[in-house]
Amino acid sequence: MGFADAAKAALLLHLSLFLLSSFAVSAQTLPQALPPLYHAISPVMPPSHPPSHHHHHHHHPHPPTPPPVYPPPPPKAPTKPPTYAPPPKAPHKPPTYPPPPKPPTYAPPPKAPSYPPPPHPPARPPTYPKPSRSFVAVQGVVFCKSCKYKGSDTLLGAEAIHNATVKLTCKNTKYKQEATAKTDKNGYFFLQAPKTITSFGAHKCTVSLLSSPLASCSKPTDLHGGIKGAALRPEKPFTANKLPFILYTVGPFAFEPKCY
């Protein structure tokens, strides 16, 4: 190595020392960089030792790089607690439910046919114990009609005739049987049939008008069969002189007056 090369090397060495000393002075005078306010980023510390230099490689030292400055992160919005919709208010009215289904209806079983009660037999007239045979007695009344109702079958205004004669005729035997009777002051008559006539043959007997004692009222009328003969209507049994009888009724009969 020659002198020139040694001189260059010495010059470079002095220059490097000068730069290094000046860098150290400037580093003391500069204010220290404040560390960042947030822990997320670590500051870049300057190298504590200058980079080593090799004698064989001639590199110029670089000035120290200031640490990068980052803007502070945007403030985070405060996290709000989650909001929930208020529960629905209970209705004032109680909830309505559909009516329960009605139970199935079944048709009632068919009723047994009802039948009307059997009709009661008609009430029979009282029956009386009849002997084997009873004798016959007949009663009735005879009147004189009023001139006001002459020719009419009515007894309005009529008056009873005293001593008028009536006749009983029976045709239940081979020979005709007859009996007569007269009225009292009330126009009433009562007669007994011959003992040959009994209740068994009374349906063949009739009673009719025979005569009137009044000349002004002597024309017989056929009211209730006064002319052609009235059939006997049984009334009741009775006993006379210890003999059984059945009382029959006819009429009433009437004569018609002569009106001037």
Image (spheres, rainbow, N blue to C red):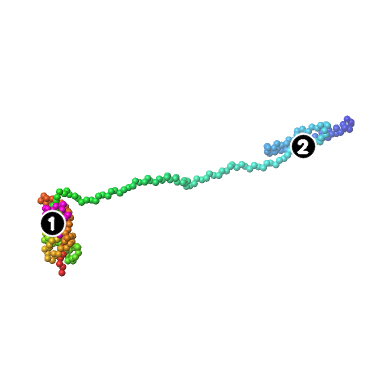
> Does the magenta portion include 94?
no
Q: Looking at the image, which residue sits at the far top? A: 1
Marks 2/1: CA distance?
A: 189 Å
Q: Secondary structure at mark 1?
A: loop
What mark, if any, has residue 64 been given in the picture? 2
Quadrant of the rendered image containing residue 69: top right
Q: Looking at the image, which residue sits at the far left? A: 241
**For this rendering, which residue is in front, 103 or 4?**
103
Left or right: 29, with 114 as reference point: right
Query: Residue drawn at (31%, 48%), measured in percent from left and top?
Result: 115
Query: Residue drawn at (19%, 50%), measured in percent from left and top?
Result: 126
Looking at the rendered structure, the kind of residue marked 1 is Lys
Q: Secondary structure at mark 2?
A: loop
Q: Which residue is mark 1?
A: 176
Region rendered in magenta:
193-208
Between discs 2 and 1, the one toward the N terminus:
2
Left or right: 95, with 1 as reference point: left
Residue 257 place in picture, x, y as percent: 15, 65
Residue 124 place in picture, x, y as percent: 22, 51
